[in-house]
Image (tube, rainbow, N blue to C red):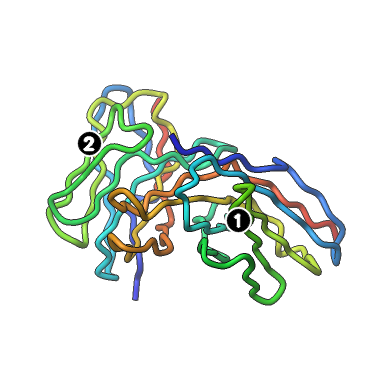
Amino acid sequence: NAGVTQTPKFRILKIGQSMTLQCTQDMNHNYMYWYRQDPGMGLKLIYYSVGAGITDKGEVPNGYNVSRSTTEDFPLRLELAAPSQTSVYFCASSSGTGLSNQPQHFGDGTRLSIL
Amino acid sequence: GENVEQHPSTLSVQEGDSAVIKCTYSDSASNYFPWYKQELGKRPQLIIDIRSNVGEKKDQRIAVTLNKTAKHFSLHITETQPEDSAVYFCAASSSFSGNTGKLIFGQGTTLQVKP
């Protein structure tokens, strides 16, 4: 059981380039999340999804887009990379329902540098 | 919006001593409180969680207490070991008002256990 899988693990981008961070989970979780973690800081929610076809903004959505066409996959898109987007990006999922919260399970992260 | 404050930001203890990390939350509707441990360069991993219908939960050397009236919760680690050295994050979430499972994280506490 792989859990939450993120690719790539590392990436260096030039300013203005675009890329997609991939996230897939094999636990049949409805809820998925994208966070960014700047050095020495906590986790900030970028976007989240409560099911296929449903996405919504978190605390820091500017400069990012997401889609959720299947239960398993939740890719994060950077359209015009900026140095401020240099960070570690974590994807997470949970089996939460509308009635109760459940623990979030995290992937290993993608370390992204914008130069 | 919801806010979670975590203290202290750094904590150094001798091996075998106890460590306590405290968090306060602002949203009285919060009813789920997980704690995550993050080792350097690794993913956050859930170590314990508590729901608002209980005041304390234990798992071996780790315990969490919750005071709903004061809106604060604490992580207690007894008999600390060098492998407990990591960054610890508290978080809070509410399952009311259209549950999304979103977590609001504290700023993190860097725990150093000295041999």
| Image coords of residue A79 (percent x, y) | 22, 29
Marks 2 and 1: which is nearer the front?
A: 2
Mark 2 vs 1: CB contact within 8 A: no
Task: Tell me if mark 2 has few (under 14), some (14-19) or many (20+) residues whose alpha carbon lies within 10 angstroms of its own.
Answer: some
| Image coords of residue A107 (percent x, y) | 40, 58
As drawn, is A32 to the left or to the right of B38? left
**Mark 2, secondary structure of its residue:** strand
Q: What residue type is labelled 1?
A: Glu
Q: Residue A2 carries which label?
A: none
| Quadrant housing residue A40 | top right
Observer-nearest of B8 and A74:
B8
User: For mark 1, what is the residue?
Assistant: B39
Q: Which mark is residue A65?
A: 2
Where the N terminus of chain B falls, by quadrant? top left
Q: Which amino acid does label 2 sit on?
A: Asn
| Quadrant housing residue A101 | bottom left
As drawn, is A16 to the left or to the right of B45? left
State which chain disc 2 sits on: A
| Image coords of residue B35 (percent x, y) | 57, 58
| Image coords of residue A35 (percent x, y) | 40, 44
